[in-house]
Every structure is written in structure tokens, then in C-alpha cells.
Amino acid sequence: ETGVTQSPTHLIKTRGQQVTLRCSSQSGHNTVSWYQQALGQGPQFIFQYYREEENGRGNFPPRFSGLQFPNYSSELNVNALELDDSALYLCASSLWVPNYGYTFGSGTRLTVV
Amino acid sequence: AQSVTQLDSQVPVFEEAPVELRCNYSSSVSVYLFWYVQYPNQGLQLLLKYLSGSTLVKSINGFEAEFNKSQTSFHLRKPSVHISDTAEYFCAVSLPGGGADGLTFGKGTHLIIQP
């Protein structure tokens, strides 16, 4: 059983640019969620995708958007990057009813300069 | 909406001593409860979870947590810690019915094991 993989592991972008982060779900999982973890903080829920549609969003602006593909992999896109977007971005996969919990990837460390 | 409070941002403890990491939650409905561990520069690993049934849940590496509904708590304990337990520990909740709110995390507790 494969786990959750994220790419790239590290990324440096300039303020105002756009970035795309990628995530492959654990085998058998149909739901993907994304989290932003600022330094020294707990992860914050960005949004969740199920059946290729966004069905839940945390307190993040529309410049944070995503996609889920038929194979349940996912992308997180962030437009007009701001310095405060610097964080570890975590992807988690699960079943729609998360009886077995959420499986997290190792994250993408995004630095905005 | 749900919220999670981890009362201690940092807990220093000597090796082989017992430890308790505190977690309280707030929710108007039933929730699932989780503890995750994060080692430096890594993602989150599920340590244990409470969904229903027995209020005491245990992990394979000696941690346990007890769900207390009246006190809305889910404290994590280990009777004897090791240097390798040094990490950040996060308590989290989610809605049980396939909710679209994801996980709500506390701010984390840094467990520091002193030799």
C-alpha cells in the first residue's frame, strides 16, 4: 500500500508569482484535503476535494484553489503569492467517512521572497 | 465549528519518566479525535484515534489516550518516554459523518526529552 506523496519537497518563489503543488493519494482513498502549517503552528485546513469537487473550505481566500483528478491525485494552486504564504503545505488523503483517519504526506516547504 | 486547545506549548521531561500531553476540544456535535506526531522536517504521522467504543485507545509504541466526554478532553500519556519520542504532538478533531471540514488541529505541544 503506497502512502501519500507530495512534490516538490522544497520551493522558492517570488512575491506575486503563482505556484502549483502536487499530491498523490494513498491507494484506496477518495478524499484529499490540503493544510497550511506556518512555522511553530498547527496545520490549518485549506480545502477538501471529493469526487473531483471542492466540498469544504477553511478561512482561505480564493487565490488558493485546487483540483482533484479521476485517480484521486490533487493539486493546490496559489496565485499572487504573498510573503505570509511561506509555510509547509501538507496534503492528506482519507475515505469520505474518515474511519481510518487521514494519511499525510511529508509536505512541500514553500518560501516566498 | 470545532476547536482544539493544547494547554502546553512545550513539555520537558526526563528520559524514562511518565508524561501527559493535554488536549481539550469544543464541539456542539460528536467528533472523532486524533493524535498526530511530527518529527523535525517531516509530515504528520497518526499516533492513535478515537472514533467510538472503548474510551481508552492505545498505540503500538506505548502511548495511550483517554476520551473523557464530560470534560471534553483527550489527553495523551506514556508511562516511560525515550529520547526518540522528542517531537511535536498535535491533537485534532474531525466530524464523523463524512464532514467537509477536514481536521481541526491544536497548536501543538513540543515534547522535549532530557537525558
Image: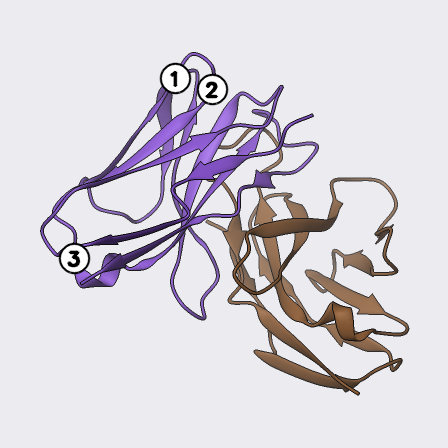
Chain colours: A purple, B brown
The residues tagged by marks 1 and 3 sit, at their Cα atoms, a distance apart of: 27 Å
Question: Dot 1: within a 10 Å radius of its alpha carbon, few (fewer than 14), some, or many (20 or more) residues?
Answer: some
Q: Which amino acid type is marked by label 2?
A: Tyr
Q: Earlier in the sequence, mark 3 or mark 2?
A: 2
> At 56% across and 65% down in the image, what residue appears?
B40
The residues tagged by marks 2 and 1 sit, at their Cα atoms, a distance apart of: 5 Å
Q: Could you tell me residue B113's position as x and y percent?
A: 74, 81
Q: Which amino acid type is marked by label 3?
A: Glu
In this rendered view, identify the residue nearer to me: B60 or B69. Answer: B60
Q: Could you tell me residue B2's position as x and y percent?
A: 51, 52
Q: Which amino acid type is marked by label 1?
A: Phe
Determine which residue is flagged by label 1: A69
Q: Quick check: A24 left or right of B35?
A: left
Q: Are marks 2 and 1 in contact (CB under 8 Å)?
A: yes
The residues tagged by marks 3 and 2 sit, at their Cα atoms, a distance apart of: 29 Å
Chain bearing tag 3 is A
Q: Could you tell me residue B54's position as x and y percent?
A: 88, 45
Element carrying mark 2: loop
